[in-house]
Amino acid sequence: MQDTTPLATDDRTRRIMLWVVAIGFFMQTLDSTIVNTALPSMAKSLGESPLRMQSVIIAYSLTMAVIIPASGWLADRFGTRTIFQTAIVLFVAGSLACAYSNSLTLLVVSRVVQGVGGAMLLPVGRLAVLRTFPRDQYLQALSFVAIPGMVGPLIGPTLGGWLTQTFSWHWIFLINVPVGLLGGLATMRYMPNARLHGVAPFDLSGYLLLAISM
């Protein structure tokens, strides 16, 4: 049974939650392009052909495409705060693993973990906004969340190139760690754990069919 009544939260809590969701969306989309300009440096460091490094990009994008359809059901079943926090933990853990990867295989696996976390940040964050804000504030709130997500892919290649040239390619992943830790703490305090009662069973067969078709 779905209850569309917004949760009772004060304005300050809602504003902070909006920033948490917006920054999460920014980091998710940023990491889809930040590795592009770092690939030659990563290939040299790992002793791989630059052409093989495309799998680092594909692993992240494909994982997000597969996981996003399941994120809404997970949030309904376990609560928006629980899943959003889980997403942050996976995203940070994947980022750390990427930074310390010493082989292409380990890097690709780490990007998959990062992609699982990143896939849940946007849809679950939007769901949290919809369940927290009054109906007349939906459009303004969702627009605020969406703008950083559009900026992320645009500055990703430039930021990735600068970090790689100034420090090393590892820092394109390490910058996610402090942001993720702060986001996790803010989520714990300011995001309500909105969930639905009587959630229908997960359509596993349909989900697998969709995943395979990708």
Image: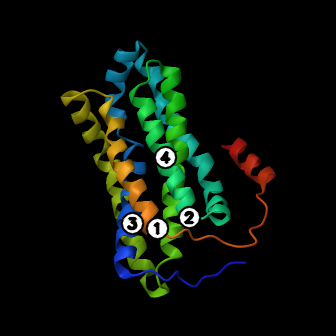
What residue is shown with label 4?
89
Residue at 55% in and 44% down: 116
The amino acid type of the residue labelled 4 equals Val
Number of marks present in the image shown:
4
Q: Earlier in the sequence, mark 2 or mark 1?
A: 2
What residue is shown with label 1?
191
Labels 4 & 2 near each other (Cβ < 8 A): no
Q: Quadrant of residue 78?
A: bottom right
Q: Nearer the viewer, residue 57 or 188?
A: 188
The amino acid type of the residue labelled 3 equals Val
Compared to residue 5, the image places residue 106 above or below, namely above
What residue is shown with label 3?
145
Q: Position of residue 80 (x, y in %)?
A: 56, 64
Labels 2 & 1 near each other (Cβ < 8 A): yes
Q: Earlier in the sequence, mark 2 or mark 3?
A: 2
In the picture, the disc for residue 80 is 2
| Distance from the alpha carbon under mark 4 to that under mark 2 | 14 Å
Q: Nearer the viewer, residue 185 or 25?
A: 185
**Quarter of the C terminus within the rendering:** top right
The amino acid type of the residue labelled 1 equals Met
